[in-house]
Image (spheres, rainbow, N blue to C red):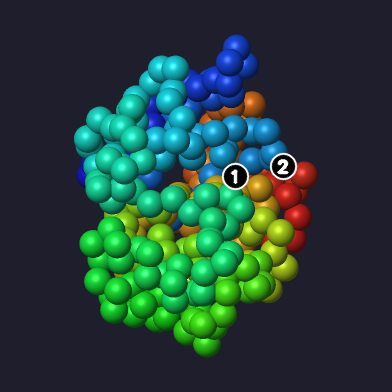
Amino acid sequence: MIPILEVVDLHAAYGRIEVLRGVDLRVPKGAVVALLGPNGAGKSTLIKVISGQMRPTSGEIHMAGVHVKGAGPDELARLGLTTVPEGRSVFPNLTVAENLRLVSYAGVPAAQVYDTAYTYFPRLHQRQDQLAGTLSGGEQQMLAMARALASDPALLLLDELSMGLAPLIVEELYRTVAQIAESGVSILVVEQFARTALAVSDHAAVMSGGRIVATGEPDEIGRQMADVMLGGAA
């Protein structure tokens, strides 16, 4: 079966500093793939290249068999790729409902946006009239994910979902990731802290020094890699 995402021998650099050094990665359709590794491994750069925010220097990117290297974020969004970037991108001076309503301007009916958001994240329904900037970090992450899901993506990229959040909130978010995957959405989740991500993943890959250094089943990867490599209790 053709994977939803295939990256082949991908290279990328910031000026003269090469950050991605021949990355090969596959995300099967309908699967959750955890991409793990320490800070500086190149994980977030890989997400930027896949999502069209940064141009690679060489290599191939295919989405559902279509060559998409060089495509911009808008074109990739039309193909079904949606990204929740590191750092929770919400509009702090708008309410929860207003943040969600913005998605409807891309052509998705507002009622559908609200229904999707509040089904996955009932807490957002309780906070719908609250300014997004006054939400907790976990609730802001829920809002960012809800906005991404409203476009009915085929492939969802989640970059450092757990950053700055308490372990219990992270577990709650990853339970929702599992529900999203059950609906048929393919997911690539990038994490420094791995255990919770591995628990909901079908496949895992470890990145270090700008390369994929290990791939396999989540249990196998969890056994192979030391806690120092995969991070703490999250």
Which residue bears the numbered disc 2? 229
Task: Indicate the quadrant containing the N terminus: top left, top right, bottom left or bottom right.
Answer: top left
Q: Which of the pair 33/156 is nearer the observer?
A: 156
Q: Is residue 179 visible?
A: no
Q: Which mark is residue 228?
A: none
Residue highlighted by disc 1: 36
Q: Residue at x 47, y 64 (%)?
A: 145
Quadrant housing residue 93:
bottom right
The percent coordinates of residue 69 (x first, y second) are 33, 28
Lateral position of residue 98 relative to residue 14, left or right: left
Residue 113 in the image, given as x and y percentages of width and height: 33, 72
Q: CA distance from mark 2 to mark 1?
A: 9 Å
- Percent from the top left, x then y, of residue 141? 56, 65
Q: Earlier in the sequence, mark 2 or mark 1?
A: 1
Residue at left offset 64%, top offset 33%: 41
Seen from this angle, which residue lies furthest top? 16
Q: Is residue 85 above or below residue 207?
A: below
Hey, what amino acid is under mark 1?
Answer: Leu
Q: Secondary structure at mark 2?
A: helix
Up/down of 129 relative to 154, above or below: below
